[in-house]
Image (cartoon, helix red, strand yellow):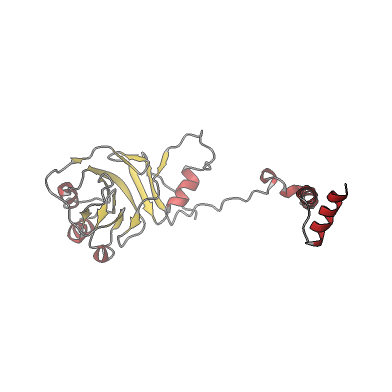
Protein backbone atom coordinates (compact mmCIF):
# COMPACT_ATOMS: atom_id res chain seq x y z
CA UNK A 1 0.00 0.00 0.00
CA UNK A 2 2.84 2.34 0.86
CA UNK A 3 4.45 2.22 -2.64
CA UNK A 4 1.07 3.08 -4.18
CA UNK A 5 0.71 6.13 -1.95
CA UNK A 6 4.26 7.20 -2.73
CA UNK A 7 3.53 6.95 -6.47
CA UNK A 8 0.46 9.19 -6.13
CA UNK A 9 2.37 11.69 -4.05
CA UNK A 10 5.24 11.75 -6.52
CA UNK A 11 2.86 12.35 -9.46
CA UNK A 12 1.13 15.15 -7.62
CA UNK A 13 4.44 16.81 -6.86
CA UNK A 14 5.26 16.85 -10.57
CA UNK A 15 1.88 18.43 -11.38
CA UNK A 16 0.53 15.20 -12.89
CA UNK A 17 -1.75 12.44 -11.76
CA UNK A 18 -2.17 8.74 -12.46
CA UNK A 19 -4.17 7.94 -15.58
CA UNK A 20 -7.06 6.60 -13.56
CA UNK A 21 -7.38 9.90 -11.70
CA UNK A 22 -6.95 11.95 -14.90
CA UNK A 23 -9.72 9.95 -16.59
CA UNK A 24 -11.99 10.51 -13.64
CA UNK A 25 -11.29 14.22 -13.65
CA UNK A 26 -11.83 14.42 -17.44
CA UNK A 27 -15.19 12.71 -17.26
CA UNK A 28 -16.24 14.92 -14.41
CA UNK A 29 -15.09 18.05 -16.22
CA UNK A 30 -16.91 17.10 -19.41
CA UNK A 31 -20.08 16.41 -17.48
CA UNK A 32 -19.82 19.81 -15.83
CA UNK A 33 -19.38 21.53 -19.18
CA UNK A 34 -22.33 19.70 -20.73
CA UNK A 35 -24.51 20.63 -17.79
CA UNK A 36 -23.95 24.29 -18.67
CA UNK A 37 -24.94 23.92 -22.37
CA UNK A 38 -28.49 25.23 -22.96
CA UNK A 39 -30.90 22.50 -23.96
CA UNK A 40 -31.85 24.47 -27.11
CA UNK A 41 -28.27 24.11 -28.39
CA UNK A 42 -28.03 20.40 -27.67
CA UNK A 43 -29.39 19.41 -31.07
CA UNK A 44 -29.55 20.98 -34.50
CA UNK A 45 -33.13 19.77 -34.88
CA UNK A 46 -34.36 22.42 -32.46
CA UNK A 47 -32.38 25.27 -34.06
CA UNK A 48 -34.52 28.11 -35.40
CA UNK A 49 -35.20 28.13 -39.13
CA UNK A 50 -34.72 31.26 -41.23
CA UNK A 51 -36.61 31.88 -44.44
CA UNK A 52 -34.74 31.90 -47.76
CA UNK A 53 -34.85 35.35 -49.38
CA UNK A 54 -37.12 35.49 -52.44
CA UNK A 55 -35.53 34.79 -55.83
CA UNK A 56 -34.50 37.84 -57.84
CA UNK A 57 -35.97 37.43 -61.32
CA UNK A 58 -33.99 40.35 -62.69
CA UNK A 59 -30.72 38.49 -62.19
CA UNK A 60 -31.64 35.13 -63.69
CA UNK A 61 -28.89 33.60 -61.58
CA UNK A 62 -28.50 29.84 -61.24
CA UNK A 63 -28.90 30.17 -57.46
CA UNK A 64 -32.23 31.98 -57.84
CA UNK A 65 -33.45 29.43 -60.38
CA UNK A 66 -32.57 26.53 -58.10
CA UNK A 67 -34.32 28.15 -55.13
CA UNK A 68 -37.56 27.97 -57.12
CA UNK A 69 -37.19 24.95 -59.40
CA UNK A 70 -35.04 22.76 -57.16
CA UNK A 71 -35.99 23.73 -53.60
CA UNK A 72 -34.93 20.41 -52.05
CA UNK A 73 -31.78 20.44 -49.93
CA UNK A 74 -28.76 18.29 -50.67
CA UNK A 75 -29.95 15.88 -47.94
CA UNK A 76 -33.20 15.06 -49.75
CA UNK A 77 -31.93 12.45 -52.20
CA UNK A 78 -35.35 10.86 -52.73
CA UNK A 79 -37.01 13.98 -54.16
CA UNK A 80 -37.58 14.01 -57.95
CA UNK A 81 -35.20 16.37 -59.69
CA UNK A 82 -36.10 18.06 -62.95
CA UNK A 83 -33.05 20.33 -62.99
CA UNK A 84 -29.53 18.91 -63.38
CA UNK A 85 -26.57 20.59 -61.72
CA UNK A 86 -23.14 20.18 -63.29
CA UNK A 87 -20.15 19.33 -61.14
CA UNK A 88 -17.97 22.40 -60.46
CA UNK A 89 -15.18 21.61 -62.92
CA UNK A 90 -15.39 24.66 -65.20
CA UNK A 91 -13.58 27.98 -65.32
CA UNK A 92 -14.85 31.18 -66.95
CA UNK A 93 -12.93 32.57 -69.92
CA UNK A 94 -15.42 34.72 -71.85
CA UNK A 95 -16.41 38.34 -71.50
CA UNK A 96 -19.93 37.39 -70.43
CA UNK A 97 -20.25 35.67 -67.06
CA UNK A 98 -23.98 34.88 -67.09
CA UNK A 99 -25.63 33.30 -70.14
CA UNK A 100 -28.44 30.93 -71.05
CA UNK A 101 -30.22 29.45 -74.03
CA UNK A 102 -31.20 26.28 -75.83
CA UNK A 103 -28.42 23.77 -76.29
CA UNK A 104 -26.78 22.72 -79.51
CA UNK A 105 -24.35 19.89 -78.87
CA UNK A 106 -21.13 18.48 -80.26
CA UNK A 107 -19.28 15.30 -79.33
CA UNK A 108 -15.64 15.24 -80.41
CA UNK A 109 -12.18 14.36 -79.15
CA UNK A 110 -9.17 16.60 -79.76
CA UNK A 111 -10.74 17.76 -83.05
CA UNK A 112 -12.72 20.97 -83.58
CA UNK A 113 -14.06 21.19 -87.19
CA UNK A 114 -17.63 20.93 -85.93
CA UNK A 115 -17.01 23.63 -83.32
CA UNK A 116 -15.96 26.02 -86.07
CA UNK A 117 -18.85 24.97 -88.31
CA UNK A 118 -21.39 25.51 -85.52
CA UNK A 119 -20.14 28.96 -84.53
CA UNK A 120 -20.12 30.05 -88.17
CA UNK A 121 -23.91 29.58 -88.15
CA UNK A 122 -26.43 32.06 -86.72
CA UNK A 123 -26.61 31.26 -83.03
CA UNK A 124 -30.10 32.57 -82.39
CA UNK A 125 -29.37 32.92 -78.69
CA UNK A 126 -28.27 29.30 -78.28
CA UNK A 127 -25.55 27.77 -76.11
CA UNK A 128 -23.03 25.44 -77.73
CA UNK A 129 -22.24 22.46 -75.48
CA UNK A 130 -19.10 20.58 -76.51
CA UNK A 131 -18.11 17.24 -75.02
CA UNK A 132 -14.41 17.06 -75.79
CA UNK A 133 -13.90 13.98 -73.64
CA UNK A 134 -12.20 16.04 -70.95
CA UNK A 135 -8.94 16.14 -72.92
CA UNK A 136 -6.30 18.53 -71.61
CA UNK A 137 -3.86 17.91 -74.47
CA UNK A 138 -5.12 20.57 -76.89
CA UNK A 139 -7.58 23.46 -77.22
CA UNK A 140 -10.95 23.11 -78.94
CA UNK A 141 -11.58 26.87 -79.04
CA UNK A 142 -9.42 29.89 -79.77
CA UNK A 143 -9.92 33.59 -80.41
CA UNK A 144 -10.85 33.37 -84.11
CA UNK A 145 -13.63 30.83 -83.66
CA UNK A 146 -14.90 32.54 -80.50
CA UNK A 147 -15.08 35.87 -82.34
CA UNK A 148 -17.34 34.24 -84.92
CA UNK A 149 -19.60 32.91 -82.19
CA UNK A 150 -19.96 36.34 -80.59
CA UNK A 151 -20.63 37.97 -83.97
CA UNK A 152 -23.22 35.36 -84.97
CA UNK A 153 -25.42 35.67 -81.91
CA UNK A 154 -24.41 32.73 -79.73
CA UNK A 155 -24.98 33.26 -76.03
CA UNK A 156 -22.22 31.05 -74.77
CA UNK A 157 -20.12 27.91 -75.03
CA UNK A 158 -19.57 25.15 -72.47
CA UNK A 159 -16.60 22.91 -73.29
CA UNK A 160 -15.55 19.70 -71.61
CA UNK A 161 -12.04 20.43 -72.77
CA UNK A 162 -9.56 23.29 -73.13
CA UNK A 163 -9.36 26.72 -74.77
CA UNK A 164 -6.51 29.01 -75.81
CA UNK A 165 -5.95 32.72 -76.55
CA UNK A 166 -7.49 33.39 -73.15
CA UNK A 167 -6.47 37.06 -73.01
CA UNK A 168 -8.56 37.67 -76.13
CA UNK A 169 -11.48 35.41 -75.17
CA UNK A 170 -12.36 37.67 -72.25
CA UNK A 171 -12.86 40.62 -74.61
CA UNK A 172 -15.76 38.97 -76.48
CA UNK A 173 -19.41 39.38 -75.49
CA UNK A 174 -19.73 35.63 -75.18
CA UNK A 175 -19.94 33.25 -72.25
CA UNK A 176 -17.18 30.64 -72.32
CA UNK A 177 -16.75 27.88 -69.78
CA UNK A 178 -14.01 25.27 -70.14
CA UNK A 179 -11.76 23.07 -68.05
CA UNK A 180 -8.46 24.90 -68.50
CA UNK A 181 -6.28 26.87 -70.90
CA UNK A 182 -3.86 25.03 -73.19
CA UNK A 183 -1.83 26.64 -75.99
CA UNK A 184 -1.76 23.78 -78.52
CA UNK A 185 -4.42 23.73 -81.26
CA UNK A 186 -6.52 20.64 -81.95
CA UNK A 187 -6.47 18.24 -84.90
CA UNK A 188 -8.87 18.18 -87.87
CA UNK A 189 -8.78 14.44 -88.62
CA UNK A 190 -12.13 13.44 -87.10
CA UNK A 191 -15.07 15.84 -87.11
CA UNK A 192 -17.09 14.11 -84.40
CA UNK A 193 -20.89 14.21 -84.03
CA UNK A 194 -23.34 17.09 -84.07
CA UNK A 195 -26.59 17.47 -82.10
CA UNK A 196 -26.40 14.23 -80.14
CA UNK A 197 -26.87 13.74 -76.38
CA UNK A 198 -23.66 14.41 -74.46
CA UNK A 199 -22.85 13.49 -70.87
CA UNK A 200 -20.12 14.93 -68.65
CA UNK A 201 -19.72 16.66 -65.28
CA UNK A 202 -22.59 14.60 -63.92
CA UNK A 203 -25.22 15.94 -66.36
CA UNK A 204 -26.68 14.84 -69.68
CA UNK A 205 -27.45 17.53 -72.25
CA UNK A 206 -29.70 16.87 -75.23
CA UNK A 207 -30.17 19.16 -78.22
CA UNK A 208 -32.88 21.66 -77.31
CA UNK A 209 -32.37 21.45 -73.54
CA UNK A 210 -32.06 24.74 -71.67
CA UNK A 211 -28.64 25.60 -70.28
CA UNK A 212 -28.10 28.28 -67.62
CA UNK A 213 -24.62 29.32 -66.54
CA UNK A 214 -22.96 31.94 -64.37
CA UNK A 215 -20.15 32.27 -61.87
CA UNK A 216 -21.82 29.74 -59.57
CA UNK A 217 -22.01 26.93 -62.11
CA UNK A 218 -24.06 25.31 -64.87
CA UNK A 219 -27.57 23.87 -64.67
CA UNK A 220 -29.61 22.03 -67.31
CA UNK A 221 -33.36 21.65 -67.75
CA UNK A 222 -35.57 20.07 -70.40
CA UNK A 223 -37.92 23.03 -70.13
CA UNK A 224 -37.30 26.76 -69.87
CA UNK A 225 -36.96 28.08 -66.33
CA UNK A 226 -38.67 31.43 -65.89
CA UNK A 227 -38.90 33.55 -62.78
CA UNK A 228 -41.83 35.92 -62.45
CA UNK A 229 -40.82 39.53 -61.90
CA UNK A 230 -42.60 41.29 -59.05
CA UNK A 231 -43.88 44.74 -59.91
Q: Residue at x 48, y 42 (%)?
A: 70
Residue 180 % position (x, y): 30, 56
Q: Residue at x 40, y 50 (%)?
A: 88
Q: Horizontal and vertical percent for residue 53?
A: 56, 53
Q: Is residue 72 left or right of residue 93?
A: right
In the image, 5: left or right of 37? right
Answer with left or right where residue 111 lies relative to residue 80: left
- Is residue 164 visible in the rendered structure shown here? yes
Rendered residue at 30%/38% (across/down): 206
Residue 106 occupies quadrant: top left
Whole-percent x, y for residue 213 in the image: 37, 52
Q: Nearer the viewer, residue 57 or 12?
A: 12
Q: Tell me the residue at 12%/48% (across/down).
A: 188
Q: Residue furthest left?
A: 189
Q: Is residue 228 visible?
A: no
- Asked whether 163 or 54 is in front, the reply is 163
Seen in the image, is 140 located left or right of residue 18?
A: left
Across the whole image, how many numbered discs are drawn on residues?
0
The picture places residue 75, in percent across and down from the top left corner, at: 54, 40
Instruction: Please state which of residues 58 and 90 is positioned toward the viewer in this rendering.
Output: 90
Q: Hey, which residue is sitting farthest right in the picture?
A: 2
In the displayed structure, 16 sits above or below 1; it is below
Amino acid sequence: MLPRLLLIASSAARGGAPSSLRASNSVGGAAALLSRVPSSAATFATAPKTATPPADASRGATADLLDIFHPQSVDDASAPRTVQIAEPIFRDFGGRLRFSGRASTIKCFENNPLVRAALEEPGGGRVLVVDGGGSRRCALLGDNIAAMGAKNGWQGIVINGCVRDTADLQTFDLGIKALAPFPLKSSKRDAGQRDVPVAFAGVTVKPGDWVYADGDGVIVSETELKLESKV
